[in-house]
Image (cartoon, helix red, strand yellow):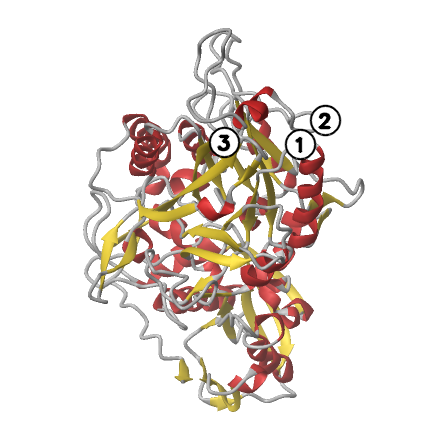
């Protein structure tokens, strides 16, 4: 996208931005509102004859997470949710798209005078072309229109580094791309919270650690954190100069700070999550017993966060759940997540006690709701999408290849992952004919390719925009040398070390085959004798040239051995490699078929 020279709007023409401030320290809670709460319901102010507020006030908390710049309705399985039926069967529902999300949220807020909208991180990053091409400015504009009040940072907020995150918060045009549409970017109307992300030099949070919502005499504090392991899932350049602290330690620290300020109602926004026992958004997470229906990192986190925190809004795992997990005192506490891509939103009722200033936890109710596409589109969102699509069209609508059927991105080994690995092997051989194989991280495969036309391009046509949605990270394709012993160790790291509990199975190029035995544990899950390259067993002493993206080449996702390669050669953009492969290997008359995803034999 060519840079457009910056232009500054007049002060009068600027959209008025909401101003946020931290609530100043207060000495106790003996306020007029608290005193009034002690009076019986229906009591009146004798001087003015006005009814006094009741003791309890319901506060609506609407929340979502992991939007990832999905302004338009996501395609394929990424745009559907599963609903559990009364008879035990399931059905799928098309969901997502900010035109519909806006309508749902606005409708939900009606008749709720006390309503807050919060998010659990990854609002941007790994975004489709309509947002990613413009450094996610369109998504920030959409979130402003959604009246988002506050969000935590997620790991993907660091994809382009802390300086770019600060620009998204504060505004200003991109340092190299300039201004888009001849307008200066105004930044987020809402605060990003990063309590556990510290500047290595100063030791201070890079953004606000907490924020307080206030209406009349009702105050609710929010603390925002991202997962401590963010450096393990983001490129090294993105987190350079930053330190990520423990989630529990940080939340407990700032919960005390808020309490000292007289804020006793506290919600934690945590970009870390869990895995419910069911993939249905309306699964009763507590049916077997409190917390039994969910596993993963959020369980231990929730069990150790101070009881002074009243609810947890979570994310990162892209799962949908409404669970109660006991706090350290043994009392149940609500923990929620709204899947991803704007397909779900959570509606939680927090009952505020004016007498204590705290949330009456026994009265907390929560439910996940589908962002269906059967409601009217929000016209302002339609206009926003149209504006940015017009700017993106010259690049995004270009046909880059042809497919004969859907290329899914799901499964232990996915056809889309295999296709990318094949593309990177071909690209690697173009850089160095000695390249032997390619490996692709599953988290870098953000979507599949669908055969049905999304626009006017025709069935089976792959556009640049669709390719961008699959690989939006702007990684490079890197070549490195490894011994056969190291190559085996890389495969073992898929299922051991930091990946023991949640394996990350690398997608292999077609010439690498092996058996993954899930009946075993740890590194033993890789059947070493089965690992073959071009049908021949890997020689521990031989040297192999491996193509990966720059994220893996830096040891990302727990693959420390991939960070120890030698004879490095840095190539070009990984999306360009995929586009080049599709263009060279497909045509309208001879489309490419989805890989069979049979390179890894899985024993269960």
Q: Position of residue 290 (x, y in %)?
A: 46, 63
Disc 2 or 3, which lies upstream in sequence?
2
Nearest the viewer among 218 and 212 is 218
Across and down, in percent, residue 342 comes to 37, 44
- Disc 1 + disc 3, Cβ < 8 Å: no
445 in relation to 395, above or below: below
Q: Using the image, tell me which numbered label, if any, was put on residue 197.
A: none
- How far apart are the two marked residues, 2 and 3, measured between alpha carbons? 26 Å
**Quadrant of residue 478 in the image?**
bottom right
Q: Which residue is mark 3?
A: 149
**Label 2 crowd (10 A; few <14 / some 14-19 / many >=20):** few
- Residue located farthest toward the right when viewing the structure as drawn: 201
Q: Quadrant of the N terminus?
A: top left
- Give the labeled residue for mark 1: 262
- Describe residue 374's horizontal placement relative to residue 464 as left or right: left
Q: Is residue 214 above or below residue 69?
A: above
Mark 3 neighbour density, 10 Å: few (under 14) some (14–19) many (20 or more) = many
- Residue at image x 38%, y 64%? 287
What is the quadrant of the C terminus in the image? Answer: bottom left
Residue under circle 2? 27
């Amino acid at each position: 996208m060519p840079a457009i020279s910056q232009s500054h709007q007049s002060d009068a023409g600027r959209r008025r931005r909401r101003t946020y401030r931290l609530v100043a320290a207060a000495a106790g809670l003996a306020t007029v509102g608290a005193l009034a709460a002690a009076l019986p319901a229906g009591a009146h102010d004798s001087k003015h004859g006005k009814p006094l507020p009741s003791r309890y006030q319901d506060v609506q908390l609407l929340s979502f997470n992991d939007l990832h710049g999905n302004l338009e309705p996501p395609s394929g399985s990424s745009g559907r949710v599963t609903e559990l039926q009364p008879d035990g069967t399931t059905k799928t529902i098309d969901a997502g798209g900010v035109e519909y999300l806006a309508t749902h949220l606005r409708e939900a807020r009606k008749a709720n005078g006390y309503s807050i909208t919060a998010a659990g991180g990854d609002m941007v990053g790994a975004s489709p072309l309509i947002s990613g091409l413009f450094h996610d400015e369109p998504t920030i504009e959409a979130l402003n229109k959604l009246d988002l009040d506050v969000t935590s940072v997620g790991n993907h907020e660091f994809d382009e580094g802390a300086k770019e995150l600060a620009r998204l918060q504060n505004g200003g045009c991109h340092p190299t791309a300039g201004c888009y549409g001849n307008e200066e970017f105004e930044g987020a109307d809402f605060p990003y919270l990063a309590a556990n992300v510290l500047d290595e030099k100063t030791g201070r949070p890079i953004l606000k650690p907490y924020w307080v919502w206030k209406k009349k005499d009702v105050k609710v504090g929010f603390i925002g954190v991202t997962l401590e392991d963010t450096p393990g899932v983001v490129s090294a350049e993105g987190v350079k100069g930053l330190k990520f602290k423990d989630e529990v330690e940080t939340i407990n620290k700032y919960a005390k700070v808020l309490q000292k300020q007289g804020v006793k109602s506290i919600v934690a926004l945590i970009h870390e999550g869990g895995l419910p026992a069911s993939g249905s958004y309306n699964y009763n997470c507590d049916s077997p017993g409190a917390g039994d229906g969910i596993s993963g990192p959020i369980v231990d986190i929730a069990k150790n966060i101070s009881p002074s925190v009243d609810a947890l809004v979570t994310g990162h795992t892209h799962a949908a759940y409404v669970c109660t997990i006991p706090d350290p005192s043994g009392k149940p506490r609500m923990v929620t997540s709204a899947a991803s891509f704007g397909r779900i939103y959570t509606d939680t009722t927090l009952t505020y006690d004016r007498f204590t200033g705290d949330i009456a936890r026994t009265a907390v109710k929560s439910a996940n709701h589908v962002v269906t596409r059967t409601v009217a589109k929000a016209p302002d969102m339609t206009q926003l999408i149209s504006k940015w699509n017009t700017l993106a069209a010259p690049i995004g609508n270009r046909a880059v290849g042809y497919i004969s059927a859907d290329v899914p991105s799901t499964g232990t080994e996915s056809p889309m992952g295999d296709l990318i690995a094949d593309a990177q092997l071909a690209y690697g051989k173009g850089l160095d004919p000695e390249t032997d194989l390619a490996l692709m991280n599953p988290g870098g495969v953000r979507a599949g390719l669908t055969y049905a036309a999304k626009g006017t391009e025709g069935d089976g046509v792959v556009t640049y925009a669709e390719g961008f949605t699959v690989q939006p990270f702007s990684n490079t394709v890197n070549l490195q040398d490894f011994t056969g012993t190291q190559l085996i160790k890389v495969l073992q790291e898929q299922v051991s070390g930091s990946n023991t509990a949640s394996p990350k199975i690398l997608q292999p190029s077609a010439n690498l085959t092996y058996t993954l035995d899930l009946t075993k544990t740890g590194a033993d899950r890789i059947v070493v004798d089965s690992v073959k390259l071009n049908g021949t067993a890997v020689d521990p002493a031989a040297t192999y040239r491996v193509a990966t993206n720059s994220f893996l080449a830096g040891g990302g996702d727990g693959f420390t051995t991939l960070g120890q390669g030698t004879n490095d050669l840095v190539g070009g953009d990984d999306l360009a490699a995929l586009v080049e492969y599709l263009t060279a290997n497909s045509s309208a008359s001879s489309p490419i078929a989805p890989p069979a995803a049979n390179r890894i034999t899985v024993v269960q």
